[in-house]
Amino acid sequence: MSTAPVTLDDVRAAAAQIKGVAHRTPVLRSRTLDELVGAEVFLKCENYQRIGAFKFRGAYNALSRLSPQQLERGVAAYSSGNHAQAVALSARELGATAVIVMPEDTPSSKINATAGYGAEIVTYDRYTGDRVAIGERLAADRGLALIPPYEHPHVIAGQGTAALELIEETGPLDALLAPVGGGGLMAGCATAATALVPGIRMIGVEPEQGDDTKRSLEAGARVSIPVPRTIADGQAAEIPGELTFSINQRLLDGIALVTDDQIREAMKWAFERLKTVIEPSGASALAALIAGVVPDLPARVGVIISGGNVGLARFAELLGDRA
């Protein structure tokens, strides 16, 4: 039997590594939500994490394990959003420099936030350029350590600390829902949760237009789809990661799909009832719950709210007609 690429021990080691640096985010409860869906729901709010999303967990775990010599040379990453900010902030915390490859049409708020943490930004055309190739070439030319958004054991283990914390606080859960993009958050959370709670149902959630993981699970191999057109930009993956899919294929029980309108409704519900702001990708797992697209919902359900990085103008644009 081959050894799993990431284990519960790896996630626990990551928890020790990020302790005191990453936030231990709150778990919110809502009696109204419980009554609405017919289950006890526990919301792990990574929108309150540093940089506003779970990505800081994995980025800091990976960067903090580099040698002093490598940190002195610097790090590189490619990302259009939360991972960019997570690597930039982690590098600053560790006294390293960071170069981030970002699409030239990335919203200025995200570029400014990444630059604000001290990173150098290198832009490219997302429709004609290959960010992985650009990042690898840049890292090789400058001697930088390349930290990918999800295809890295330390990144995956770091993301899994969200589920570790949740279950430590709530006790055993019957199911855990988390959004799936490249698959790193779900791979880490599934690794931790299934080891801690044998028999727990792991349900990934994707936007209808970005169902590459669902199709891949059904096909038994990674399937590529056209660039998804969805408001859940953090889940607009064309194909699951190779490493993340190898874990998710083994540990997931299924994928639920949500529409953009269902995501909008979840964002609105969270704002009005929980008084919290969630970005579209961060709201997808909650959307699946509220929309009732998870069959045979069990009694105790955990939900990962993965992030809250949405600007005021974009938030108003998305929800304006739902006031």
Image (cartoon, helix red, strand yellow):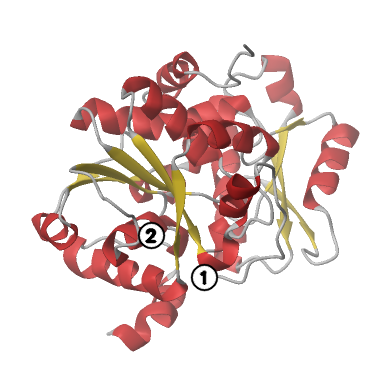
On screen, residue 204 versus residue 275, left or right, reads right
The relative height of residue 78 versus residue 104 in the rendered view (above or below) is above
In this view of the protein, which residue sits in the foreground, 135 or 233? 233
Q: Is residue 105 left or right of residue 181?
A: right
**Could you say which is closer to the camera, residue 240 or residue 164?**
240
Report, in whole angstroms, how far the alpha carbon at label 1 lies from the one at label 2: 11 Å
Amino acid type shown at disc 2:
Ala
Q: Tell me where residue 319 sits by quadrant.
A: bottom left
Classify mark 1: helix, strand or loop.
loop
Which type of secondary structure does the marked residue at label 2 adopt? helix
Q: Which mark is residue 231?
A: 1
**Percent x, y of residue 51:** 46, 47
Residue 127 or residue 60, whichever sits in front: 127
Which circle marks residue 283 in the picture? 2
> Residue 285 in the image: x percent, y percent?
38, 55
Q: Crowdedness of circle 2 by 10 Å Cα count: few (<14), some, many (20+)?
A: many
Residue appearing at x 57%, y 36% in the figure:
249
Q: Residue at x 36, y 85 (%)?
A: 320
Q: Identify which amino acid the numbered label 1 is placed on.
A: Ile
- Is residue 84 visible to us here? no
Q: Residues within 10 Å of mark 1 (few under 14, many from 20)?
A: some
